[in-house]
Image: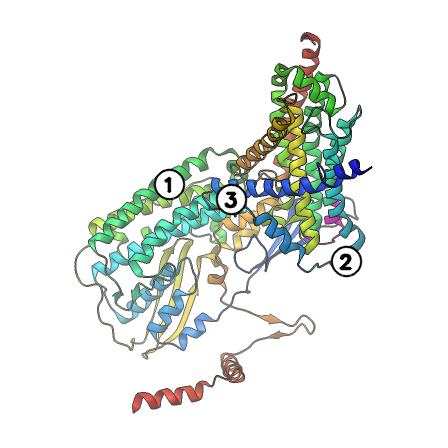
């Protein structure tokens, strides 16, 4: 009982995710600034922003549905925080695992996007509603390739549990290389999931102000930003577990720092990519996802089906 | 595709306050999904009554006020105004002053085009481009600050010439700055031609055909990107442009991408113009004396501002104050074409299409009409009412100009 509570609230649950998320946000912002030849924020800036937002007044639009409006940011945090319990991060076994937990994790990671949609839709402002529809449209574009890539990796490992996949890949280290296409595609899809350039269409500042979050302020905005940070960490952890399964059979003192490095590496790649490109239009984004990412993901599935037969186990 | 009867267009207001706009202006956009079905522009949020205020001031005072029409093309407006005044007064300014005005004008064009490139980058979500160009823009801003003493409102013009001369050391600094900027601009040209996401967002967006550009009267880079190779510097040379060698950049692609290429090309021409000015600048005085009272008469002056043709009309009545000043900023000529460019585009194209004419709304607003939405009455306020209201307002704040003037005149006379 206490052990479960510890896992949910402290490690690897909410507290760890919150602190690591703040650090991830700092790293992302600092690197983004350095790539652009700016100084960037000091290390405590994300925490300072959080405290500032928490202490600020909360304004809820008169037209908005108060319950949904208030509930959604919290639901977003909860959904992504629960997902981490099924992702093996510091040993081959996750906190909880069962055969089929890959599907559950992917499903849990979809919930935040839905909460952003509902929160935006029920705030009843034109900008929020357009942003909400955009985030949902975008979801249909990147979700399929992302799922396919992770499922392709599961196919090769012949298990539907993340812990099983990690065990398989850390025992057969060479097989990691087979999923390299999937890793690339999943990284690009992660940009869409985290709504970062070139896929920051739902919150394109110059078009729809802040998209779904236009009407959010104070504590609720702080929760939304936290949920994005947590989503970034959980998404990166998922990719790290599936596509970078190195050294998980080493001693625990080595594995945990290794996990942190893997997640930070993915964050670095994300912030590098977002300083390289201009924002795409929604139609361009969708056609890019369906014309390039989805076929590549299918290729990965096909490849893994063949490899499964050919390669020795 | 025909939509069902209960599916209405969504009307979204872009402005008067919106992150895409750097100045208050109102665009009302009807959307069907992501597509724009109609767009209307409403001007008038920035009216400051500058034209009228000029009539209350002497020519020299008016010059500094005119300069404040715009923060980016401040030299354009002040030069355009002063050319008209000098024409009425029948004054020929010294050759060195002409060259110095040209020098500042071209440096201003460089800073304005670099600023535009950054803004365009921001509008399409390419913030790295914004940060890079604005960093490079500091080079030319620093040069302007060294030459004139100010970064934004240079105030280099004065009646009958310019206010400051340049030294040979400053000439070297300018040439060095031009070398740096030329290299950077070559990089941006390369970027504009090769960066895929940039091309995707700019090409084929905001089409303004050659015929439309002509009939809507587009000027400056907006017109030149639609194949109208008009440039006041070439067609009706002022200052020292007749003695300098440069090309008028124009392309025929008619889209936002073309407007980007025109501005980048003009940057390269400006670097060459600045170098020519530095090498050809003659020695001599920098200003001539002009009487305080300008003889009666009228004149129109044209000037190629970074955004297009700027036009000033001045009527003098023989006193030290102008009788009438009229300003037509380039944005007023270009704003008409925005609704045309937005036809059948996506919402995502709206910011860059508006930004592509390089709008300067506070330059443009010459008129305001206040309408009471309840009684539907138009209310026109005359100058005298505003004057009285202003005096009353300051009295309420504890400032009485009448007594201040009395005190001041006492001190001057005794």
On the picture, is B63 further left or further right than B384?
left
Q: Is residue B266 above or below residue B18?
A: above
Which residue is labeled 2 in the image?
A63
**Circle on res. A261:** none
Q: Give x and y (percent) for residue B383.
A: 49, 79
State the separation of the CA atoms marked 3 and 2: 34 Å
Which secondary structure lies at badge 1? helix
Chain ID of residue with mark 2:
A
Q: Which type of secondary structure does the marked residue at label 3 adopt? A: helix
The C terminus of chain A - image quarter: top right
Q: Work out whether B117 lies above or below B320.
A: above
Magenta segment: A117-127
Indicate the chain on which mark 3 is placed. B
Q: Secondary structure at mark 2?
A: loop
Q: Where residue A62 appears, x then y in whole percent?
A: 76, 60
Instruction: Read off the residue under disc 1.
Output: B184
Residue at horizontal 26%, vertical 47%?
B175
- Residue B235 locus on image (x, y percent): 33, 52
**Labels 3 & 2 near each other (Cβ < 8 A):** no
Is residue A64 visible in the rendered image? The answer is: yes
Q: CA distance from mark 2 to mark 1?
A: 50 Å
Figure quadrant of the N terminus of chain A: top right
Residue A169 % position (x, y): 67, 18
């Amino acid at each position: 009982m206490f052990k479960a509570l510890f896992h949910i609230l402290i490690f690897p649950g909410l507290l760890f995710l919150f602190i690591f998320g703040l650090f991830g946000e700092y790293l992302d912002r600092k690197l983004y600034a350095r790539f652009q030849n700016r100084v960037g924020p000091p290390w405590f800036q994300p925490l300072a922003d959080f405290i500032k937002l928490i202490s600020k007044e909360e304004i809820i639009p008169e037209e908005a549905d108060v319950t949904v409006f208030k509930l959604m940011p919290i639901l977003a945090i909860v959904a992504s925080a629960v997902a981490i319990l099924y992702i093996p991060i510091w040993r081959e076994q996750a906190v909880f695992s069962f055969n089929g937990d890959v599907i559950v994790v992917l499903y849990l990671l979809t919930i935040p996007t839905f909460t952003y949609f509902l929160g935006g839709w029920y705030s009843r402002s034109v900008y929020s509603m357009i942003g909400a529809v955009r985030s949902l449209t975008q979801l249909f574009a990147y979700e399929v390739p992302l799922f396919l890539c992770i499922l392709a990796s599961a196919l090769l490992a012949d298990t539907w549990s993340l812990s099983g996949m990690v065990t398989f890949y850390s025992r057969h280290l060479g097989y990691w290389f087979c999923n390299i296409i999937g890793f690339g595609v999943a990284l690009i899809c992660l940009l869409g999931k985290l709504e970062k350039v070139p896929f920051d269409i739902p919150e394109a500042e110059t078009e729809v102000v802040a998209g779904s979050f236009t009407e959010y302020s104070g504590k609720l905005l702080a929760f939304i930003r936290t949920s994005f940070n947590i989503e970034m960490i959980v998404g990166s952890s998922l990719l790290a577990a599936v596509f970078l399964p190195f050294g998980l059979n080493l001693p625990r003192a080595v594995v945990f720092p290794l996990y942190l490095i893997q997640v930070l590496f993915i964050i670095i790649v994300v912030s590098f990519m977002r300083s390289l490109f201009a924002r795409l239009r929604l139609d361009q984004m969708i056609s890019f996802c369906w014309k390039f990412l989805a076929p590549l993901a299918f290729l990965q599935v096909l490849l893994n089906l063949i490899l499964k037969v050919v390669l020795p186990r | 595709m025909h939509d069902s009867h209960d599916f209405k267009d969504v009307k979204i207001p872009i402005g008067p306050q919106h992150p895409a706009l750097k100045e208050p202006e109102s665009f009302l956009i009807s959307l069907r999904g992501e597509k724009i079905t109609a767009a209307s522009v409403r001007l008038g949020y920035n009216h400051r009554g500058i034209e009228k205020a000029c009539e209350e001031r002497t020519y020299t005072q008016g010059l500094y006020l005119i300069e404040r029409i715009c923060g980016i093309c401040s030299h354009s407006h002040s030069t355009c105004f002063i050319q008209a005044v000098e024409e009425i007064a029948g004054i020929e300014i010294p050759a060195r002053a002409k060259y110095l005005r040209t020098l500042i004008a071209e440096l201003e064009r460089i800073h304005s085009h670099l600023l535009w490139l950054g803004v365009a980058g921001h509008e399409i979500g390419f913030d790295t481009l914004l940060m890079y160009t604005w960093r490079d823009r500091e080079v030319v801003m620093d040069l302007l600050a060294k030459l004139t003493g100010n970064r934004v409102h240079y105030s280099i013009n004065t009646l009958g010439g310019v206010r400051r001369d340049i030294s040979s050391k400053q000439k070297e600094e300018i040439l060095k700055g031009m070398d740096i900027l030329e290299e950077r601009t070559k990089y941006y040209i390369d970027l504009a031609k090769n960066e895929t996401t940039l091309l995707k967002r700019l090409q084929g967006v905001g089409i303004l055909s050659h015929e439309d550009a002509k009939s809507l009267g587009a000027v400056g880079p907006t017109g030149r990107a639609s194949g109208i190779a008009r440039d006041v510097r070439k067609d009706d040379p002022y200052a020292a442009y007749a003695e300098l060698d440069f090309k008028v950049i124009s392309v025929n692609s008619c889209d936002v991408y073309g407007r980007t290429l025109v501005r980048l090309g003009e940057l390269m021409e400006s670097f060459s113009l600045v170098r020519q000015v530095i090498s050809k600048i003659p020695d001599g005085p920098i200003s001539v004396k002009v009487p305080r009272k300008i003889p009666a008469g009228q004149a129109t002056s044209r000037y190629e501002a970074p955004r297009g043709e700027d036009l000033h009309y001045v009527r003098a009545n023989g006193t030290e104050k102008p009788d009438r000043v009229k300003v037509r900023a380039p944005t007023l000529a270009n704003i008409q074409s925005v609704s045309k460019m937005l036809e059948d585009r996506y919402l995502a194209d709206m910011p860059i299409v508006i930004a592509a004419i390089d709008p300067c709304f506070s330059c443009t607003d010459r008129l305001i009409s206040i309408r009471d939405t309840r009684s539907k009455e138009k209310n026109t306020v005359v100058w005298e009412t505003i004057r009285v209201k202003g005096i009353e307002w300051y009295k309420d704040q504890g400032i009485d100009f009448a007594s201040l003037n009395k005190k001041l005149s006492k001190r001057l006379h005794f």
